[in-house]
Image: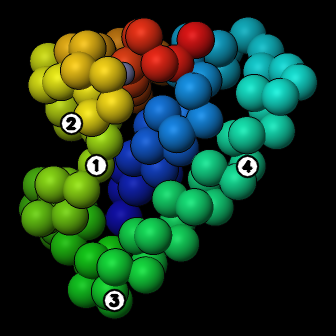
């Protein structure tokens, strides 16, 4: 399940409209208030999609399973944002890749 947390964080930040760059600094006020429910929603959806989804999420060989197709931003660098069409960007922080929409997430 290595890397699963990072996937959830990327997807939750997208929903909450928070840039991953902000995590290093501070997330305050209404943006922070949106983050917790966003993480809960991502978790609930991935679990609700079926018991096999979590197992397929990251296969034993480390490759992402078919559930990757449901991600809004994770692993989609250069692909259009599902909300605004802007290309998804990737940055590396502390050895982790963060995928995000620079237009939606500030
Ligand atoms: Zn966007």
Circle 3 is placed at which residue position?
A: 51
Q: Which residue, given by chain and number where applicable, does mark 2 sit on?
A: 75
Q: Secondary structure at mark 1?
A: loop
- How far across and how far down the image is residue 98, in percent? 39, 26
Mark found first going from the N terminus, 4 or 3? 4
Mark-to-mark CA distance, 2 and 1: 8 Å
Q: Separation of disc 4 and disc 2 at Cα?
A: 22 Å
Left/right placement of residue 93 relative to residue 78 reads right
Mark 4 element type: helix
Which residue is more in the foreground, 97 or 11? 11
Distance from disc 2 to disc 3, alpha carbons, whole Å, reads 22 Å
Q: Secondary structure at mark 2?
A: loop
Instruction: Say if mark 2 contacts mark 1, CB within 8 Å.
Output: yes
Upstream in the sequence, badge 1 or badge 4? Answer: 4
Name the spot of residue 4 as percent of width and height, x first: 40, 55
User: Element type at marker 3?
Assistant: helix
Above or below: residue 78 compared with residue 72: above
Labels 2 & 3 near each other (Cβ < 8 A): no
How many other residues sit within 10 Å of disc 3, few (<14), some (14-19) or many (≥20)?
Answer: few
Q: Is mark 2 within 8 Å of ligand 1?
A: no
Left of 49 or right of it: where is 48?
Answer: right
- Between marks 2 and 1 in the image, the one whose residue lies nearer the viewer: 1
Spatial CA distance of label 1 from label 4 is: 18 Å
**Marks 4 and 3 in Cβ contact (< 8 Å):** no
Task: Work out whether residue 77 can be spotted.
Answer: no
Which residue is pictured at 27% across the width and 35% down the height? 82
Q: Residue at x 31, y 42 (%)?
A: 72
User: To which quarter of the image does residue 28 belong?
Assistant: top right
Alpha-carbon neighbours of circle 4 within 10 Å: few (<14), some, or many (≥20)? few
């Amino acid at each position: 399940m290595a890397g699963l947390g990072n996937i959830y964080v990327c997807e939750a930040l997208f929903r909450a409209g928070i840039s991953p760059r902000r995590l290093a600094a501070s997330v305050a006020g209404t943006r922070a208030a949106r983050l917790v429910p966003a993480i809960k929603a991502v978790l609930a959806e991935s679990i609700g999609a079926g018991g096999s989804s979590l197992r397929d999420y990251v296969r034993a060989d480390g490759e992402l399973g078919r559930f990757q197709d449901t991600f809004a931003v994770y692993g989609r660098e250069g692909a259009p944002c599902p909300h605004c069409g802007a290309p998804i960007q990737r940055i590396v922080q502390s050895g982790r890749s963060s995928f995000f929409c620079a237009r939606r997430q500030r």
